Image (tube, rainbow, N blue to C red):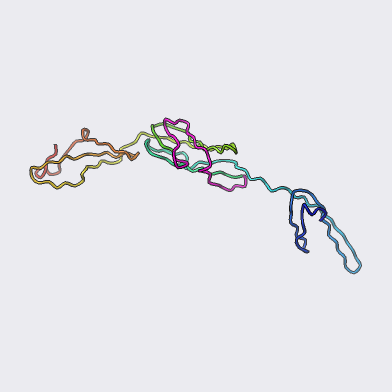
């Protein structure tokens, strides 16, 4: 090997190890029974390929949630060698409308405030690569009605109020006492009114 800074011979079997970028000549000598032969080759050593971020993907996308909930996204960088790296904690999280959804802790989480569509963006500032996902925030919907307390034990002539509590998709509750109709399954035992 003409230039030992570029490459080195690591075995007599011809195994060559590159050391730095550059070009060098490699020569092989054969000598047996008075016959000598020489062959040459050129070795070009290139620098290692630079792996870069080609894209940032957000999951899940698109996403739908009732307002008042916290929704979480994950950011994954797609590298030029097709590998994947979780960059959820490295990106800058943004919302196209902070009146609808706003970033909160932990990284990738968004608190929702009002119904409407919003674009969630994850930006790697130094690499100048961004990923986007659609988020649709809906009006909270009723899920179930609960009576509190769920079980009563009363003596004849005693009274106790029942509180109807409506549970919504955003985990909030509402006392709907003035909005429900009441009915007893057995008016001989108890009347509601």
Residue 102, image quadrant: top left
Determine whether, in the image, residue 138 is placed left or right of residue 167.
Answer: right
Q: Which residues are magenta?
A: 80-109
Spot the residue most to the left. 157
Residue at point 19%, 36% (across, down) = 181
Determine whether, in the image, residue 183 is placed left or right of residue 82.
Answer: left
Q: Name the foreground residue: 164 vs 180.
A: 164
Q: Position of residue 122 (x, y in %)?
A: 52, 38
> Would residue 103 be counted in the magenta stretch?
yes
Residue 66, image quadrant: top left
Q: Position of residue 158 (x, y in %)?
A: 10, 42
Spot the residue most to the right. 34
Determine whether, in the image, residue 170 is placed left or right of residue 57.
Answer: left
Residue at point 56%, 38% (across, down) = 124
Q: Main secondary structure of the magenta part?
A: loop
Residue at point 18%, 40% (across, down) = 162
Residue at point 14%, 39% (across, down) = 192
Determine whether, in the image, residue 26 is placed left or right of residue 78.
Answer: right
Q: The C terminus is located in which quarter?
A: top left
> Would residue 153 be counted in the magenta stretch?
no
| Picture mark count | 0
Q: The N terminus is located in which quarter?
A: bottom right
Q: Name the foreground residue: 84 vs 184.
A: 84
Q: Position of residue 157 (x, y in %)?
A: 8, 42
Q: Position of residue 159 (x, y in %)?
A: 12, 41
């Amino acid at each position: 090997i003409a230039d030992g800074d570029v490459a080195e011979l690591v075995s007599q079997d011809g195994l060559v190890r590159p050391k730095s970028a550059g070009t060098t000549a490699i020569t092989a000598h054969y000598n047996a029974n008075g016959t000598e032969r020489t062959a040459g080759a050129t070795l070009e050593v290139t620098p290692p390929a630079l792996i870069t971020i080609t894209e940032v993907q957000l999951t899940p996308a698109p996403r739908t949630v009732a307002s008042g909930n916290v929704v979480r996204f994950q950011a994954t960088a797609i590298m030029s060698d097709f590998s994947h790296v979780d960059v959820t904690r490295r990106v800058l999280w943004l919302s196209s409308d902070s009146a609808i959804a706003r970033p909160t802790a932990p990284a990738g989480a968004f608190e929702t405030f009002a119904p409407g569509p919003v674009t969630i963006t994850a930006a790697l500032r130094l690499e100048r690569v961004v990923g986007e996902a659609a988020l649709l925030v809906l009006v909270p919907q009723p899920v179930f009605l609960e009576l509190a307390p769920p079980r009563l034990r009363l003596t004849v002539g005693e009274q106790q109020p029942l509180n109807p509590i409506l549970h919504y998709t955003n985990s909030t509750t509402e006392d709907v006492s003035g909005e429900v109709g009441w009915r007893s399954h057995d008016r001989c035992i108890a009347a509601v009114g």
